[in-house]
Structures are given as C-alpha cells and as structure tokens.
Amino acid sequence: MNHFKKGLTLVMMIAVLIITGCASETSEASISEQMDYTITGIEPGAGQTELNEQVIEDYDNFEGWSQQTSSTGAMLTELDEAIKNEEPIIVTAWSPHFKFAKYELKYLEDPQKIFGDGEYAGKIARLGFEEDFPIAYQILDRFETDVKTLEQALLRAQEEELEMDVLAEIWYDENKDTLASFTEGLDPVDGKPIEVLTTQWDSELFIAHVQKELLADHGYDVKVTAVDPSILFEAISTGSGDVTFSPWLPNTHGAIYEEYEDQFVDFGVVYEGAKAGLAVPAYMDIDSLEDLEPNTTN
Ligand code: PBE
C-alpha cells in the first residue's frame, strides 16, 4: 500500500512536471504573440519603414503582423523598457548607431535579403554643383570616414548628451589635423552660400555638420537642413538643395534613387560597412526573421 502511494505521488509529480513543461513551451512558442505581432518601427518616412512593410508582405510567417511607426526616440524608449523587463521586442535597427554599444542586440537573419547585403552612405549633388562650387566639390569629393569612427563619435554624444551639431564642432576641432588633407592645397573662398541637406538620423546629422564645419572653415556660408529621404532626393534633383551625404545605398534608398536617377550627380561613397535590418535583444531565443510566427487569431 505504502509502495502504491509512493508510486502514485511519483506519477503525479511527473504529470505536474510534464504539464508545466508544456505550459512553458507554449509561452516560448508565443514570443510573436507576446509582441502582439508588431514590429516596433521608426519614422514613417524612413527607408527602413518601407523595407519592414516588404518583410511583412514577402515573408509568409509574417502574415497578420503590423508595423508600429512613430519616431526613432520612441523606438529607443520602447527598446529600453523591454530590455529592463526582459520582454521580447523586435525593432528597426541600423549601424552605425549607439544602440549596439549600449545593449546586446542581434540582427535577425534575412534569408530573402530584403535589407540587402550591406550598405554604404553615398554622395549626391545637384546638377551644376561642381561648376558653381569647384572648391567645395573637391573638398567633399575627398571627404571619407568609416563606421568605427562614426560609432565612437555617436557613443560619445550619447554619453555626454550632445546634440549632433555640438558633437560635430567638438569632433572637428579635435580632428583638424587629420581632416586637413581634405582641404589641402585648395584656395579658401569668400562667403559663398551652400545648402547641405541631410536626413534626421544621428549618423547623417553628424556627418552633415562635419561637412558644415569643414566648408565653413574654408570660407563658405553653410546651412544644414534636415528632411525625409524622399524630400532629400527631390530637393537635390530640382536644385533647391546643393549636396547631401545621407543616401543609404544600394538598398535602403535604392527605390528613390532610381526614381530620380540622372537628375543629380553621384560622386561616390562617404563610408562603407553600414547595415540595416530588424534586431532583437540577445536574450531572445530566435535568430532569423523566419523564426517568428504568423498571427492566426484573425
Ligand atoms: N536609417 C538611418 C535611415 C537611413 C539612415 C537607416 C534609419 C532610413 O531608413 O531611411
């Protein structure tokens, strides 16, 4: 009898273990459900916002998902909160950006290559810019940087709470010697106005303000204006802005680039090794966009 009771208890204990095991498996399986089948996006006008929509359309397992757009700031706040609570979240991500230094994040594999194979920041100018501003054109043509340099600068801005224009001023002063090669041998000019366009993301804002410092130091009167990617290409193509280093190519802004092709001058690369994608905190047990589940509740 005693033996029988013991056996029964054991069977019950095993049953409880199996049931709890199943339950935790169910909650594992519903990471997608916990995220409410929602991608935490950024500004509606971002190139990546379009790409996220394409992910939802092209990956079968994203059926029934939606993207929540707002702003980069709001996305970062939600990311921060999710990480504090160890909750699942999937966000619009790109490098260079300080979030990869601040948090342990991983890009999800993208077998369909919606986000391409790696990006570079391109240089485009309005038609006639080189003829009107030959010296500025040469300076900007020589200018180049790299992801590591940008990441260090952006992280510093985050730690010291610096706006991008202030960061650019400080950084320009500290790196004047290295930057001198971009202006070497070129005659200074006298107060000619140039409008540099940029998108509103930190890496691009920072570079635009470095351009401003560099050109202003050479005598130009530079104005920096931040706009959405579609306005950026339109303004350069119609000649209402002079030059920009903000296009992300060949993929992120590739469609807009093609739309305006031949209406601007493409004069090269600012930096290579940029990346765009969807990322999750490292504690999440998924590696690929294909690991998420469709929303079958509708
Ligand atoms: N970004 C940063 C921008 C370009 C640079 C990747 C968020 C975009 O998606 O348009």
Image: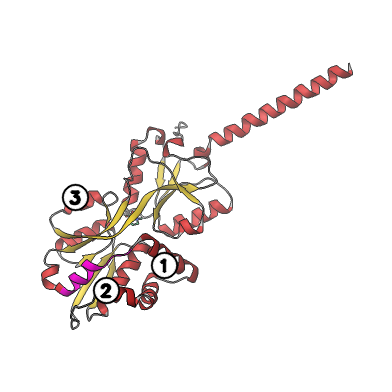
Look at 15% across and 62% down and name the residue there: 238
Name the residue nearer the viewer: 176 or 151: 176
Secondary structure state at the residue bearing disc 1:
helix
Q: Are marks 3 and 1 in contact (CB under 8 Å)?
A: no
Dividing the picture into quadrants, the one containing residue 191 is bottom left
Residue 215 tag number: none
Query: Which three-letter amino acid code belongs to the residue tagged 2?
Result: Ser
Secondary structure state at the residue bearing disc 3:
helix
Residue 147 is covered by the magenta coloring: no
Q: Is residue 216 left or right of residue 69?
A: left
In the picture shown, does residue 289 fall above or below 237?
above
Of the residues tagged 1 and 2, which is closer to the observer? 2
Residue where numbered disc 2 is placed: 181
Residue 137 is covered by the magenta coloring: yes
Query: Which three-letter amino acid code belongs to the residue tagged 1?
Result: Ala
Task: Specify start and end residues of the magenta stretch as a single range.
Answer: 135-145
Residue 153 tag number: 1
